[in-house]
C-alpha cells in the first residue's frame, strides 16, 4: 500500500507485485504465527495496505469468523482484491475499501490492526533520515484497540542492502541526479529497539524482532524484477514518457544488480532484512 509520497506516481501494478509472490508472503506467515489470541470470537480486523487481496485471505484463514476490512490507496490493487469480497466459510466477512494509511482513522473498536510491508510508504516524520510517519500514528491505532487487542506489522529494513544503495547511487550519479536525485536516499523505518520502546510507552506488551530471509529467486534478473514492483516505482514514474531514458537507466541498474547478486546454479540468492512488531493492549 502506498501513501501520500506516491502522489503523481502511476498506480501499483498487481501483476508486477506478484512476480515473486511466494517469497513476498513469507514475512506475513512469520508475523501471523506470533499474534496471540484475540479478545473476541468474532474479531474486527483492519488490514492496512491489503494489496491485491491474497494476503488478506490469510487473515480469514486464521480467523474464519472475523469481520475483515482491507484498506489500500491503489485502485488497481483494490480492483483485484474486491474479487474476494463477501462472506467467508467460517461465518465472517471480507471487504475492501479505498483509503490512505496517512489518513485512516478507525471508525470502531478493533481486535487486530495489521499491516504487511506497507507502513514505510508513509511520509517521514521529523525530517529526512527519520523513521516514517507511521510511528506518529501508533497512539491512535492502539487507542482504537479493544482491551487485549493487537497491533501487528512488518516493514522492510533492507535500505542499506545493495538493491537499495546501488539504486540510490545511480539516481544521484551525474547522469541522473537532476531527474532522479530527489528523495533517492531514504530510510523510512525505525530500528527494532525504537519500535519496542514506542509501543511499550503506550502500555503495550511488546514482541519485536528482526529476520533476514534469504530468498532463492529464479528467472532472468530476478532482483530487478522484484524492485520494479516496489523501490523502482518512483524512478519509472519520473522517466515515464521517455522510453529511451527508462531503458538506459534499467540497463545500468540491471548490470549493477547482476554483479551484486550473481546468478548461481540454484538461482539468485537475495537476502532481505525485515522488522516485525506485535503489540498487545492490556486486557
Image (cartoon, grey):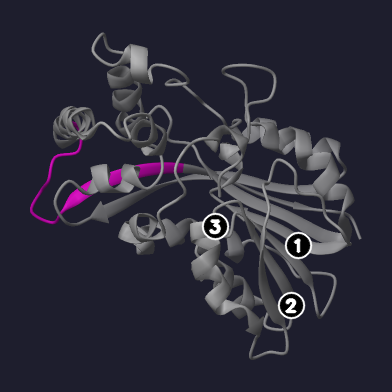
Q: Which residue is nearer to you in this view: 277 or 223? A: 223
Q: What whole-number distance in Å separates the C-alpha atoms at marks 1 and 3?
A: 24 Å
Q: Are marks 3 and 2 in contact (CB under 8 Å)?
A: no
Please tell me whether mark 1 sits on a helix, a strand or a loop: strand
Q: Which residue is mark 2?
A: 66
Toward which corner of the image does residue 90 lie, by quadrant?
bottom right
Q: Which residue is mark 3?
A: 75
Q: Which mark is residue 177?
A: none
Residues rendered magenta in the picture: 260-273
Instruction: Decide if residue 264 is on the left or right side of residue 144.
Output: left
Q: Is residue 145 visible?
A: yes
Q: Does 183 appear above or below 110?
A: above
Instruction: Decide if residue 248 is on the left or right side of residue 204.
Output: left
Q: In the image, which is nearer the foreground, mark 1 or mark 3?
A: 3
Q: What is the crowding at mark 2: few (fewer than 14 residues within 10 Å), some, or many (at least 20)?
A: many
Q: Position of residue 44 (x, y in %)?
A: 79, 70
Please tell me whether mark 2 sits on a helix, a strand or a loop: loop
Q: Position of residue 177 (x, y in %)?
A: 33, 13
Q: What is the crowding at mark 3: few (fewer than 14 residues within 10 Å), some, or many (at least 20)?
A: some
Residue lying at the far top in this picture: please name it.
Answer: 174
Q: Is residue 266 in the magenta section?
A: yes
Q: Which residue is nearer to you in this view: 236 or 69? A: 236
Q: What whole-number distance in Å separates the C-alpha atoms at marks 2 and 1?
A: 10 Å
Q: Are marks 2 and 1 in contact (CB under 8 Å)?
A: yes
Q: What whole-number distance in Å separates the C-alpha atoms at marks 3 and 2?
A: 24 Å
Q: Which residue is mark 1?
A: 112
Looking at marks 2 and 1 on the same chain, the residue that comes earlier in the sequence is marked by 2
Residue lying at the far left in this picture: please name it.
Answer: 265
Q: Are marks 1 and 3 in contact (CB under 8 Å)?
A: no
Residue at 72% of width from left, 35% of height from top? 135
Q: In the image, which is nearer the foreground, mark 3 or mark 2?
A: 3
Q: What is the crowding at mark 1: few (fewer than 14 residues within 10 Å), some, or many (at least 20)?
A: many
Amino acid at each position: 500500500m502506498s501513501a501520500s509520497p506516491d502522489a503523481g506516481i502511476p498506480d501499483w501494478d498487481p501483476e508486477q507485485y506478484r512476480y515473486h509472490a511466494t517469497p513476498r508472503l513469507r514475512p506475513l506467515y512469520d508475523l501471523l504465527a506470533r499474534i496471540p489470541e484475540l479478545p473476541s470470537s468474532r474479531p474486527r480486523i483492519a488490514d492496512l495496505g491489503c494489496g491485491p487481496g491474497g494476503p488478506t485471505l490469510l487473515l480469514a484463514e486464521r480467523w474464519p469468523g472475523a469481520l475483515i476490512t482491507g484498506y489500500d490507496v491503489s485502485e488497481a490493487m483494490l480492483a483485484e482484491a474486491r474479487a474476494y469480497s463477501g462472506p467467508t466459510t467460517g461465518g465472517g466477512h471480507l471487504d475492501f475499501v479505498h483509503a490512505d494509511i496517512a489518513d485512516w482513522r478507525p471508525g470502531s473498536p478493533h481486535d487486530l490492526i495489521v499491516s504487511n510491508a506497507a507502513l514505510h510508504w508513509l511520509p517521514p516524520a521529523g525530517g529526512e533520515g527519520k523513521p516514517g510517519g507511521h510511528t506518529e500514528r501508533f497512539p491512535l491505532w492502539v487507542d482504537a484497540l479493544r482491551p487485549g487487542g493487537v497491533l501487528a506489522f512488518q516493514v522492510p529494513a533492507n535500505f542499506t542492502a545493495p538493491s537499495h544503495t546501488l539504486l540510490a547511487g545511480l539516481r544521484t550519479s551525474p547522469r541522473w541526479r537532476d531527474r532522479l536525485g530527489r528523495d533517492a536516499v531514504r530510510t523510512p523505518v525505525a530500528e527494532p529497539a525504537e519500535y519496542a520502546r514506542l509501543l511499550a510507552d503506550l502500555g503495550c506488551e511488546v514482541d519485536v524482532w528482526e529476520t533476514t530471509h534469504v530468498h532463492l529467486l529464479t528467472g532472468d534478473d530476478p532482483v530487478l524484477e522484484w524492485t520494479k514492483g516496489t523501490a523502482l516505482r518512483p524512478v519509472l514514474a519520473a522517466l515515464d514518457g521517455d522510453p529511451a531514458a527508462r531503458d538506459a537507466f534499467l540497463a545500468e541498474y540491471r548490470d549493477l544488480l547482476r554483479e551484486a547478486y550473481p546468478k548461481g546454479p540454484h538461482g539468485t540468492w537475495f537476502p532481505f532484512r525485515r522488522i516485525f512488531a506485535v503489540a498487545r493492549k492490556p486486557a
